[in-house]
Amino acid sequence: MPARNATKLKANTAKTKIVISSFTLMLLLLTLFNIYKSLLPSKIIVLTAPSKDNKWFWNETIMKYPSYRDAYIELAKLSLIDGDYEISQSMLTKALKLDPFSVEAKEISKVLGMQK
């Protein structure tokens, strides 16, 4: 009987080591993936031709949800494409008031020369 218990204990220990090793390997791979992603160049902002419908949509969204930061950012991008720099700056200022840490708003404000 004691021999059987020793065999079971060894088997359980081996299974535990495999589980811990697998978990450690997955954790290492996820860490390496995150490091790789952080070393990639920052996201490129793609500006497309605006339409009246897009501007209308984002204006309506702001009217309904005045604290929705992304609506201000989208309207700022559309205004930038149209050459309405003052409106674009105004929308970015409002977006940054709502979320001072918004990476996208900061990137666009750099394009407009609002930030260093």
Image (cartoon, grey):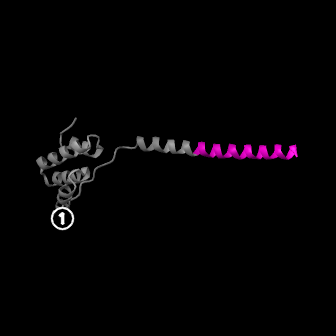
**Residue 41 inside the magenta-drawn segment:** no
Camera-side residue of 87 and 43: 87
- Magenta stretch, main secondary structure class: helix
| Residue at 64% over, 43% down | 21
Residue farthest along the top direction in this orientation: 116
Residue 88 screen position, x and y as percent: 16, 49
Above or below — where is 60 with respect to 22?
Answer: below
Quarter in which the C terminus is drawn:
top left
Task: Give the residues drawn in magenta, as a range.
Answer: 1-25
Q: Which residue matches tag 1?
A: 53
Residue 14 screen position, x and y as percent: 73, 44
Above or below — where is 74 with respect to 32?
Answer: below
- Horizontal side of 54 relative to 14 (left or right) equals left
Query: As shown in the figure, which amino acid type bears the numbered disc 1?
Result: Asp
| Residue at 50% over, 41% down | 31
Residue farthest along the bottom direction in this orientation: 53
Hey, which quadrant is residue 98 in on the image? top left
Number of marks drawn: 1
Disc 1 crowd, CA 10 A, few/some/many (<14, 14-19, 20+): few
| Residue at 15% over, 45% down | 89
Residue 23 screen position, x and y as percent: 60, 45
- Horizontal side of 75 relative to 42 (left or right) equals left
Residue 57 screen position, x and y as percent: 20, 61
Camera-side residue of 66 and 22: 66
Label 1: state its secondary structure.
Answer: helix
**Residue 11 inside the magenta-drawn segment:** yes
Hey, which quadrant is residue 41 in on the image? top left
